[in-house]
Structures are given as C-alpha cells and as structure tokens.
Image (spheres, helix red, strand yellow):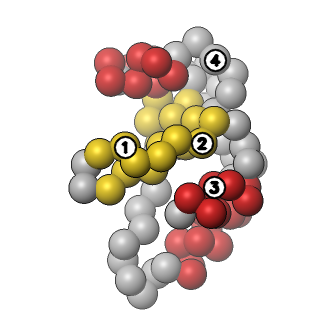
Amino acid sequence: IDVYQAWCGPCKAVRSLFRKLQNDFSEDDVLHFAVAEADSIPTLQPFRNTCEPAFLFCANGKIIAIVRGVNAPLISKKI
C-alpha cells in the first residue's frame, strides 16, 4: 500500500517498479497494489504530516513490513 498525503498524491517514482513486479507475479495472483491517503483514514494517522512516502506490506490483513522513503531495492526485497 502506497500511503500518501493529500497534498502530494501517490508516489510516481515507483510506478514502473510496481508494474514490473505485477508482471513478474501476474500468474500467481498473490500480489496486489493499492494507494491510501493518510489524511482520510484514521488507522494511518501515524503516517500523516510527513513528506516521506511510506509503503506498507500486508498479508492476511496485517501489516508485516514498512518501507519509509523511496528505496526501490528495499521495496523489491520486501515483496
């Protein structure tokens, strides 16, 4: 989940990485990407008021990892 602030929108810098990973895992149907505006979701309050993007990795409805900032190699490793 790409967690973003309302004033800046989702992180465009990693879209190509997400497209590549989606293609790599397309047959398995285990990988899904989403965006969430931190300002409008109470659960995401800890991610508000920062200009640094945050990427949440979830499995079975639970957050299992967080990457703060745009770090493509680390994001790929977490996936």
Residue 60 as seen in the image, left or right of residue 58: left
| Mark nearer the N terminus (3 vs 4) | 4
Q: CA distance from mark 3 to mark 1?
A: 14 Å
| Mark nearer the N terminus (3 vs 2) | 2
User: Mark 3 against mark 4, which lies toward the viewer?
Assistant: 3
- The residue furthest top is 49
Three-letter amino acid code of the residue under disc 2: Val
Three-letter amino acid code of the residue under disc 3: Ile
Three-letter amino acid code of the residue under disc 4: Thr
Q: Which residue is mark 4?
A: 50
| Mark nearer the N terminus (1 vs 4) | 4
Q: Secondary structure at mark 1?
A: strand
Mark yes or no: residue 33 visible. yes
Mark yes or no: residue 10 visible. no
Determine the image quadrant of residue 5. Answer: top right
Comparing 20 with 47, the one in front is 47
Going 29% across and 45% down the picture, which residue do you hit? 62
Q: Secondary structure at mark 3?
A: helix
Determine the image quadrant of residue 53. Answer: top right
> Residue 61 location in percent, x, y?
25, 48
Comparing 9 with 25, the one in front is 25
Does 64 appear above or below 3? below
> Residue 64 location in percent, x, y?
40, 48
Q: CA distance from mark 1 to mark 2?
A: 11 Å
Comparing 42 with 46, the one in front is 46
Q: CA distance from mark 1 to mark 4?
A: 20 Å
Going 37% across and 43% down the picture, which residue do you hit? 63
Q: Are marks 3 and 2 in contact (CB under 8 Å)?
A: yes
| Mark nearer the N terminus (2 vs 4) | 4
Q: Which residue is mark 3?
A: 75
Q: Which residue is mark 2?
A: 67
Q: Residue 63: which disc?
A: 1
